[in-house]
Amino acid sequence: MQKYKSLILLSCAALILVTGVAGPRAFADNANPYFHYALGLIHDIYGRRDDAIDEYRKALEYDRDSPSIHTRLGADYISSGRMDEGILELKAAIGLDSGNAAAHLILARLYLHLKKYEESELEYKEVLKLSPGSIEALIFLADFYVLSERYEEAIPVYERIIEEKKDMPSVYFNLATIYIRLNRYDDAVVYLDKTLELEPGNIEAHLYKGVLHELKGEDEKAEGEYKKSFELKPLAAGVYHRLAQIYYEMKMADKAIEQYRQLLQIEPMNLAGYRELGSIYLEENRYQEAVEVLEKAVKLKDTGDAYSYMLLGTAYEGADRKEDAISSYEAASRINPEDDAPHFYLGALYEKVNDKKKAVEELKKVIQLNPLNANAYNYIGYMWAEDGENLDEAIELIKKALEIEPDNGAYIDSLGWAFYKKGMVDEALVQIEKAANLLKDDPVVRDHLGDIYSKKGLIEKALKEWERSLEIDSKQEKVREKIKSRKGDIHKNE
């Protein structure tokens, strides 16, 4: 947060140059908006934010149509933590002058800080329209597309950055990793080579090149890249660690495991190494090996490590050691009593072993610790709906989940299913058809929709949905029986 505020303060300082004073008017008249505007600038320079805000507000009393004043006031509101007021002022500035690059830039940074990524993307795009060479806006867009897995859109943005600034090795490296994700290995090598031209000591670039050569069967070249990495970092543990991560990123799990084992031989107290190796075993459904690794992890710290206990609990569940899993989640909760995650995992586990009372107790603890945990509200509500119990309360809980995440298809399905169990078939149909549009390939939603159509006597539609559900997940014997039974009824009536 402090880093962010510093960024905004720098933006505000820059605005003195960007927005300037709106005209060469005399400042002696205190009824003149520019008199108060100038005083606000002076207060800003000396860090007197509240005084600056007062002056900008006075300036607006005399000139409501000055984008410069609205921009300054908005920036100061934001740096004072008054985000909503800041947004209003910046939008007012843009409304008066759509070409106000400074206002768009501050809004873009603010939305990014607030994790409103789509709004931030739109504002950065506006900045680029007004200032096509803005490196900050280009970098944001490129990184945003990567995080959104929109790799093809990221490539031309990174290429534009290179056009503006050719000496940034990180940009070439990022392009290389994108090409790796797209399986365009030859293109990746080109950009890794460019990275190494600008930054010969970039160990990750050497490691990625080594792995790519290995994939192409060029073992000698791969060895050469790995050797360079170890020469650059004689304390080899870090190289083993990063190489293990790269192997796993590239879906070479066995190679990754081998490197993690090497790492842990060199650094037997490396907690991150145990956690990451344990996580790979979990991903690979090798639960017993995960247990062995993670049991070592939880012993590395005298006080225990909550995250390691959570992973160990998951490993115990996979190994069908339910009591040990419960003990691990409880240990995680003792270490970090403010964390809602252990209680959620406990609730889910108790539900699996059919102890619904304890499941509800744990899930209610989740809600106490984190009232915005939509999943917990939905979990209790859907569990009760499945059992046909407490249906009014179940509906209210699921509605609460939807207040937090209104477009969550799973929660919409839960609400429809609770309506169905209460006999509100028409209301159920509305919700579950909506869920089916959001989750087109969810077998449970398709099964529920089939049940509702069947209840309404729409047998052909019901069969179509059940068959679709079975296509998605062929292991559903109950759905198979429904299809068989209904088709049998049709034949009897023919």
Image: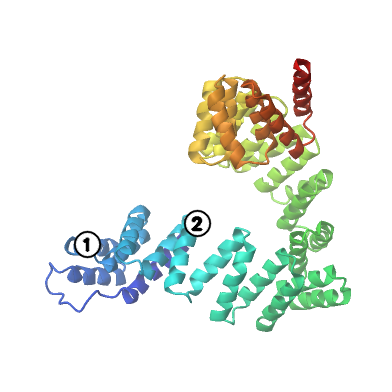
Which residue occupies 43% across, 60% down?
110
| Residue 189 falls left or right of residue 127 | right
Identify the mark at residue 104; answer none if there is no mark: none
Which is more N-terminal, label 2 or label 1? 1
Q: Place residue 215 in its image quadrant.
A: bottom right
Q: Nearer the viewer, residue 393 or 187?
A: 187
Q: Which residue is mark 2?
A: 118
Q: Position of residue 410 (x, y in %)?
A: 60, 37
Q: Amino acid at mark 1?
A: Arg
Q: Is residue 393 above or below residue 38?
A: above
Q: Count neighbours of disc 1 (C-alpha within 10 A) and say few if under 14, some if 14 to 19, many if 20 or more.
A: some
Q: Is residue 296 visible?
A: no
User: Residue at 73% of width from left, 27% of height from top?
Assistant: 353
Kindly identify which residue carries mark 1.
64
User: Which residue sits furthest front?
Assistant: 494
Which of the pair 361/224 is nearer the observer?
Answer: 224
